[in-house]
Image (cartoon, rainbow, N blue to C red):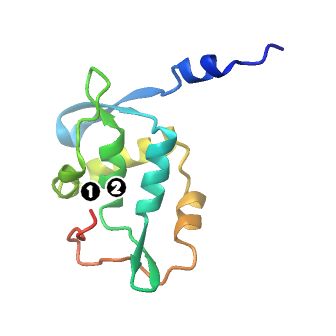
Amino acid sequence: MTLLTRDEILAADDLTTEDHEVPEWGGTVRIRMLTGTERDAFEASVTQQRGKSVQANLTNVRARLVSLCIIDATGRRMFSREDIPALGRKSAAALDRVFDACRRLNRIGDEDVEELTEGFPGTAATDGEPSSTD
């Protein structure tokens, strides 16, 4: 067994991509795995500090994850943070389809979501409108 070097690890092309048909949008999207930094930021976005309390923030959670994963043909993210509210207004069926693919590709299971939101009294916003942190 040969141990990897630092340079080999850092040079490894380890961000898998997949193409998924989204009939509601009339075509195919390409998604990619999150980097470690992106996954940490996404997981941190699932919680929100409100004064001394911390709540689960599931507002636009599908759009937030999808915006991090959809890339163009050159491998660049297609959506910015500013696009999340507009993306969240797209078809729930389409978002679910892509969200599920992103979760599977990034190994974000139901257990992960439950762990992140465990012990929180509820979601930060329930009216369907994005909070000021989205």
Q: Nearer the viewer, mark 1 or mark 2?
A: 2
Crowd around label 1: few <14 · some 14–19 · many ≥20 (10 Å)? some
Nearest the camera: 48 or 112? 48
Q: Report the residue marked by disc 1.
A: 92
Crowd around label 2: few <14 · some 14–19 · many ≥20 (10 Å)? many
- Give amino acid for label 1: Ala
Secondary structure of the residue carrying tag 1 is helix
Q: Residue at x 29, y 29 (%)?
A: 76
* Quarter of the figure with residue 101: top left
Q: Is 123 above or below relative to 85?
A: below
Q: Residue at x 34, y 55 (%)?
A: 62
Secondary structure of the residue carrying tag 2 is helix
Residue 67, how many percent across, how many down? 29, 45
* Quarter of the figure with residue 69: top left
Nearest the camera: 59 or 5? 5
Residue 105, how many percent across, how many down? 49, 38
Q: Is 49 above or below relative to 18?
A: below
Residue 131, how many percent across, how many down? 25, 71
Circles 1, 2 touching at the beta carbon (< 8 Å): yes
Residue reaching furthest front? 6
Q: Residue at x 62, y 22 (%)?
A: 9
Q: Residue at x 28, y 66 (%)?
A: 133
Q: Report the residue marked by disc 2.
A: 62
